[in-house]
Structures are given as C-alpha cells and as structure tokens.
Image (tube, rainbow, N blue to C red):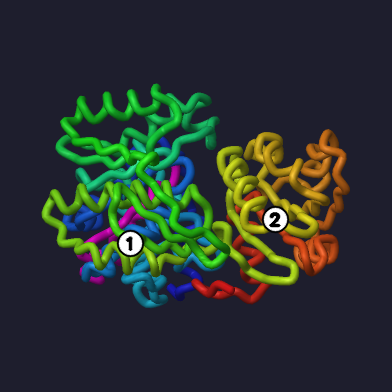
C-alpha cells in the first residue's frame, strides 16, 4: 500500500457503516489491541471553536515538554494534517503502516465501519507507535457516538461553544445538541466548559457531570481583558493573569483560549507539569489556518472555514473591525446541507458585492442556488463556478483598498489555500 493508497482507503472505504454507534469502533480497536487505552488524552467537543482550542492546547502541551499527538478533522489540503505528532503531519511511512493494520483488523471483524472509525483507529496507532505522552482529540461529530469516544475517561474533556449544526443527526435544539456533546463526559473525569449563552445548556452539562461524578470548570468571559488587538494578533489577560499573546484573530478566539486555560488548570490538578512559561509560549506560537486567516493583501484576502450562523455572527463583527475601509466583497462557497440562509443573514448586509462559487464536493450548493438566497439583500451577485475566476473577480470588485472575505466551508478554505500557494502552516 502506498501513502496515497492509504489515504484513499481511510477516506473512501469500503465503509458501509453509519455513525451513532460505538460498537464498530470498539470491535476494531479490540482487534488492534486497544492502543488508545495506554494514551493520556484530552478530548474536545463543541459546535464552534474545537479546532482552534485543539491547536492551542496541543501547542501549550508541546511547549511544556510533552510529545504530542493531535487528531483533527476535516483537513484543509492534505489528509496527513489530520494526524500530527509534535505538530508535524503524519509521515507517509507511519500512515501507511497504520492503514495496513487497520485494513487487516477491519477484515477480521463483522462490524459495518465508517470512514471516521478507520481514520480514528489509524490515528491511535500512529500516536502509540510514536510514543506520544499527550494526545489531543477533536471530536468529529457530536460526542456520545463519535469514534473518538472509544477512549477511557480523558484527563480533561473540553466542551466548546454549542450551536445549531448537523441538526439532522444531533437534534434541532441547542439543549439536544448539548446532551450529545456531553456524551464525552465519563465517570471520574473533569470538564472545562465554554461559558454558554443558554442556562439550559449549562444545566444539561452540569447535570451530566453530577451523574458521572466529574468535576466542572466553566470559563468566565467577564474575566477576559483585551490589552491590544490588531491584524497582527491580540494580547489579553484572563483572571488577572499575565498578558498572553495570541496570533489568532477575533474576540471569539480569546474566549476559546479561556477554556483552554481552564483545561490547563484541570490538567495541573491531575499531575500534568505545565509551567506558566509553556502556556505563554504555546499560545503565542499557535497557528490554525483557515480561521480568519489573512492570506493576501491589496486587497486584504481573508479565509475562514466557518459555515454556520454562529460563525457568521463572529465573522461579521470581525470583518468590520479588522478591515473597516474600502469595498467589502464576500466570496462564498457552501454545502447544500448547511443553513446557508442563516449563514448569510449577518454577513450579506456588510458586503458591497458577493461572488458565489462552487465547492468541490458532491454535497456542494450550486452557485446559482446560493445566489438566489441573496436576492432579498439587493446586492450585486456574480456567479463564478470556476474557483480561480471567482478569486480574480472578487479581488477586482474589492479594489486594492478593500477586502475579500472567502467563507462558507472548510473545503473552500483548503482549496483556496492551495490555489494561493499557501502550504502547510504558512501565513502571510
């Protein structure tokens, strides 16, 4: 099996299973010797912010001297981004070896697996083989029945901002979705929680913690103090602590960082050695592409993989704050199963023009269908199915003094990074 064959196998199967059961992943891991049981894990769920929090916490733990594993999804440009050891995407050799073991084990069990089951199993094999002493796992979908939940109680579970997304699978209220996310809370565990807007959400999480005998720390966003904030990054303080530098843009990233800081306190209580210097250095070194990423100038060209109404609210505020001058142009590409109308509501009023393009996926929303949703806003709308044409059209419309915000899908963000020549973790 070549590395490319390994990636294709893990992504595309054959995988006849359906999510919402842990039985298949448990059978697969048992056939592999349950390598996940020997790993010390931090588990991160949520609708928004879990990827950024995963990146922050992994970088802090690495700065503290731990050999880290990081499992996130989806990838932006290459599958290997999903599985990282000490911040480096998995090597072809390590990925191939893991995929071959997964394929062998999958053939010996009578369970209908999903692609995410296979990817998760491969990640655990990579981390075990590399001798990782700290593993940060981002939930793929939901929590309770996500393949990553095959682990024993993690040293800390983070539950990030909860909103309406994947409603067909997780439920159509934030309380239902919160219950699904709370499925990662295990007996004897500990939880760091993003301060929810809904008391009902916090009550649901707190109730699950009581049932499981798990401790709970809730981030207090009133304790955040912004010291500086510009396109170059931000400096903030939390709970009267030292000034902390964060390259990621947006006040929502400060809130994500606050949850990470609560998680650090949980881990310290559980014996992890994480000095203040590692927290400061780790946050300052965090890079997470595709989230308010400044990918070009004249005009400012900003990439964001946000695709639900909560993300759009944050994007609208930050687009106006960081890029206040000139013409504003939206470059949109979305999936048909997302709430496109809800996503457009906060953003479309800010735009001087909108360019609709196609995301390379069978689930993509056609540019014409996306454009039709913009009719109530009476904005100039240009349909450009070809991505390169869409980029050039958006830039011309913005003019050098303006800004282009490309958003609506992580798949779009990844394709644009490739088109713009941004590789790996490179940022302009």
The image quarter containing residue 130 is bottom left
In the image, is 254 to the left or to the right of 98? right
**Total tally of numbered discs in the picture:** 2
Q: Give the residue at mark 2.
A: 324
85 lies above or below 345: below
What is the distance, in whole Å, between disc 1 and disc 2 at their CAs?
Answer: 33 Å
The residue depicted at 27 percent of the width and 49 percent of the height is 263
Q: Which residues are magenta?
A: 117-141
Magenta-colored stretch includes residue 67: no
The image quarter containing residue 220 is top left
Label 2: how many residues lie within 10 Å, few (<14), some (14-19) or many (20+)? few
On the image, the x and y values in percent for residue 219 come to 33, 41
Q: Quadrant of the N terminus?
A: bottom left
Residue 320 visible from this viewpoint: yes
182 lies above or below 351: above
Residue 58: numbered disc:
1
Q: Nearer the viewer, residue 310 or 138?
A: 310
Magenta-colored stretch includes residue 130: yes
On the image, the x and y values in percent for residue 368 come to 83, 45
**Which of the two labelled residues, at mark 1 and mark 2, occupies the earlier sequence position?**
1
The image quarter containing residue 379 is top right
On the image, the x and y values in percent for residue 280 come to 31, 64
Q: Nearer the viewer, residue 217 or 169?
A: 217
Label 1: how many residues lie within 10 Å, few (<14), some (14-19) or many (20+)? many
Q: Quadrant of the C terminus?
A: bottom right
């Amino acid at each position: 099996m070549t590395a490319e064959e390994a990636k294709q196998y893990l992504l595309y199967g054959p995988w006849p299973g359906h999510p919402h059961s842990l039985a298949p992943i448990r059978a697969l891991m048992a056939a592999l010797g349950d390598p996940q049981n020997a790993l010390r894990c931090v588990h991160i769920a949520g609708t928004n912010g879990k990827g950024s929090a995963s990146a922050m916490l992994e970088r802090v733990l690495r700065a503290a001297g731990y050999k880290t594993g990081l499992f996130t999804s989806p990838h932006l440009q290459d599958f290997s981004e999903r599985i990282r050891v000490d911040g480096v995407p998995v090597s072809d050799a390590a990925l191939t070896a893991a995929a071959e073991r997964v394929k062998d084990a999958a053939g010996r069990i009578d369970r209908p697996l999903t692609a995410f089951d296979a990817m998760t199993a491969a990640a655990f094999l990579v981390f075990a083989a590399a001798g990782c002493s700290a593993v940060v796992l981002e939930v793929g979908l939901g929590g309770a029945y996500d393949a990553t939940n095959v682990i024993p109680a993690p040293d800390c579970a983070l539950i990030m901002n909860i909103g309406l997304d994947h409603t067909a699978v997780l439920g159509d209220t934030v309380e239902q979705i919160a219950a699904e996310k709370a499925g990662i809370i295990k007996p004897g565990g500990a939880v760091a929680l993003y301060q929810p807007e809904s008391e009902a959400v916090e009550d649901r999480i707190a109730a699950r913690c009581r049932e499981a005998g798990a401790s709970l720390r809730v981030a207090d966003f009133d304790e955040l103090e912004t010291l500086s904030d510009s396109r170059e990054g931000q400096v903030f303080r939390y709970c009267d602590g030292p000034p902390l530098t964060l390259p990621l843009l947006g006040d929502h990233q400060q809130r994500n960082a606050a949850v990470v800081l609560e998680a650090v306190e949980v881990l310290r209580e559980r014996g992890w050695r994480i000095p203040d210097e590692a927290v400061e250095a780790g946050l300052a070194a965090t890079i997470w592409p595709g989230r308010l990423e400044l990918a070009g100038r004249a005009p400012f060209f900003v990439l964001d993989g946000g695709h639900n109404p909560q993300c759009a609210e944050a994007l609208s505020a930050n687009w106006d704050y960081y890029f206040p001058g000139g013409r504003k142009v939206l470059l949109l590409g979305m999936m048909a199963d997302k709430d496109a109308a809800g996503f457009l509501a906060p953003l479309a009023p800010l735009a001087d023009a909108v360019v609709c393009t196609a995301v390379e996926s069978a689930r993509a929303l056609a540019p014409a269908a996306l454009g039709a949703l913009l009719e109530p806003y009476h904005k100039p709308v240009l349909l450009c199915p070809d991505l390169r044409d869409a980029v050039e059209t958006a830039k011309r419309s913005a003019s050098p003094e303006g800004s282009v915000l490309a958003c609506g899908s992580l798949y779009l963000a990844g394709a644009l990074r490739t088109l713009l020549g941004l590789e790996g973790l490179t940022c302009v």
